[in-house]
Image (cartoon, rainbow, N blue to C red):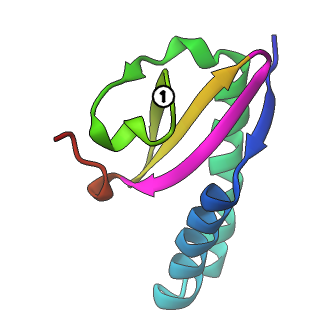
Amino acid sequence: MMYKIEVLPAAREDIDEYIDYITNICAMPLTAAKIYDSLFENIYAIAEKPLLYAVREGLWYMKFGAEVRRVNFKTRAIIYTIEDNIMTIHRVASQSEIYNR
């Protein structure tokens, strides 16, 4: 079953900042385009079996609700929840931003 994907504004902003950094600061626009495509390929792959990934616990994750899941993608972490047939992407955060206190 393919889940519907909802990308929240905070996640969109994370993606835009990540791709802008690679494009403008690293001066690698072709690489940025490939990473963008690969990121969304990963998101679509997750949406096919979103329950496959473990529920995360910890204060950092609690702000996104119950049963928050995480999948790493390069230096980022795709943070999502599932409700009914909708997979909601809350953040595509830097892994270094995530803490478990």
Return the residue nearer the eye: 30 or 46: 46
State the residue position of label 1.
Answer: 68
State the residue at coordinates (77%, 26%).
86
Q: Which of 36 and 51 is in front in this view?
A: 51
Q: Position of residue 17 (x, y in %)?
A: 56, 74
Return the residue found at the far left: 101
Residue 57's x, y, as percent?
31, 26
For the image, the number of numbered tags is 1
Packing grade of label 1 (10 A; few <14, some 14-19, many >=20) is: many
Front residue of this view, candidates 46 and 26: 46
Q: What are the residue bounds of the magenta stretch? A: 84-94
Check disc 1 and report its element: helix, strand or loop: strand
Quarter of the image holding residue 60? Answer: top left
Snapshot quadrant of residue 101: top left
| x then y, percent, for residue 38 | 65, 49
The structure residue drawn at horizontal position 81% and vertical position 18%, both measured from the top left corner, is: 2
Residue 31 visible (yes or no)? no
Instruction: Kindly tell me whether residue 91 is visible in this rendering.
Output: yes
Q: Does the magenta stretch include residue 56?
A: no
Q: Residue 68 appears at what percent x and percent y?
A: 48, 28
Q: In the rendered image of this protein, does residue 14 appear above or below residue 74?
A: below
x 47%, y 34%: residue: 71
Q: Where is 61 relative to 4, above or below?
A: below
Q: Which amino acid does label 1 sit on?
A: Val
Q: In this view, does 49 lie to the left or right of 77?
A: right
| Side of 101 where 25 appears, left or right | right
